[in-house]
Amino acid sequence: MTATDRAPGGELPRHRPTLAEIANLAGVSPPTVSRVLNGQAGVALATRQRVESVLREHGYRRRDSEPAAILELVFHALESLWALEIIQGVEQVARERGLAVVLTEMQGRLTPGRAWTEQVLARRPTGVVAVFSELTVQQQSQLATRSIPLVVLDPTGEPLHQTPSVGATNWSGGMAATRHLLDLGHHRVAMLSGPTQWPCCRARLDGFRAAMDAAGVYVDPALVRISTLYVEGGLRDGAELLRLPDPPTAVFCSNDLQALGVYEAARRAGLRVPEDLSVIGFDDLSFTQWAGPPMTTVRQPLVQMGATAARMVLRLADGEPLEQHRVELATTLVVRESTAPPRT
């Protein structure tokens, strides 16, 4: 391409740039640009970033092949019914569109590795739904370059404005659970939070604090614990709470697994739920109605969240604009038999 081929100011003419023109601007060979577009190995990181920058700058999108008839679903971990319900929602929408779902579990890692990125770029799915995962800016750019839309479900970081996301009303859910305990007459209310670097956990904790503050009830720092979102976390931290000189009469947990752990901590301490200790969970997983006693919890519409994320990513794949880039679905307090007024 000569200088006369350029528009005033040295910019590319107003037509879709060719692969050769992109290569010229990036100072690389056309095969190198092709490898970047296809997510193939053998390109130095600095070179890949330079090529992707030029691709973004000039709005280059591949049009020489159709996306595969698959929807890519990425989880940081598959360790509970929580994940299964989201999968069901995504699969329902994918089935309606005749798409298969490819599922990747990152074994607890929040960010997929380079191998995953290269495999996805090579597969070129219709779209990617990332659940409780963090894709790097570079990974997001690589997907965008290949015209692969991305939607994040329950993001672990602050949702980026340019990244569509789906979540639930965690703050109001935390407030509703705490108000229920306060209305029953509890004042020594404990809170087992999940990791507070995750917005969903922080929002539930903030909802708890807001309800306590609105009721004029002091929050004892000893009753607020940052725990893990597993049965083991609820058992460990629940046992510590119950060993306090002035233990709580009620515990609000950040998820149902924690609450199940608190059930066991109470049993080992010789206490009964709800006669001696009221317990509330969060999520409303299927086992909660069969727990002993059936668990009061905050229902998070997980199936609907998965379906919403899938519909959003398919709408983007169809080239249609989203009505909202951030969707939050309502939570609902489900009162069963694990909560009761405190002993007088």
Image: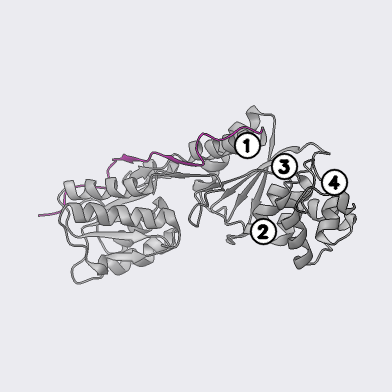
Disc sitting over residue 229 in the figure: none
Residue at (50% x, 57% y) in the render: 157
Name the residue that disc number 4 marks: 18
Give the CA distance from mark 2 to mark 1.
20 Å
Give the CA distance from mark 4 to mark 1.
24 Å
Nearest to N terminus: mark 1 or mark 3: 3
Circles 1 and 3, Cβ within 8 Å, touching? The answer is: no
Disc sitting over residue 138 in the figure: 2
Give the CA distance from mark 1 to mark 3.
13 Å
Nearest to N terminus: mark 2 or mark 1: 2
Q: Could you tell me the amino acid type at mark 3? A: Pro
Name the residue that disc number 3 marks: 125
Foreground mark, 4 or 3?
Answer: 4
**Is residue 103 left or right of 216 when viewed as pictured?**
right
Residue at (73% x, 62% y) in the render: 49
Foreground mark, 1 or 3?
Answer: 1
For the C terminus, the quadrant is: bottom left
Name the residue that disc number 1 marks: 316
Residue 70 belongs to magenta span: no
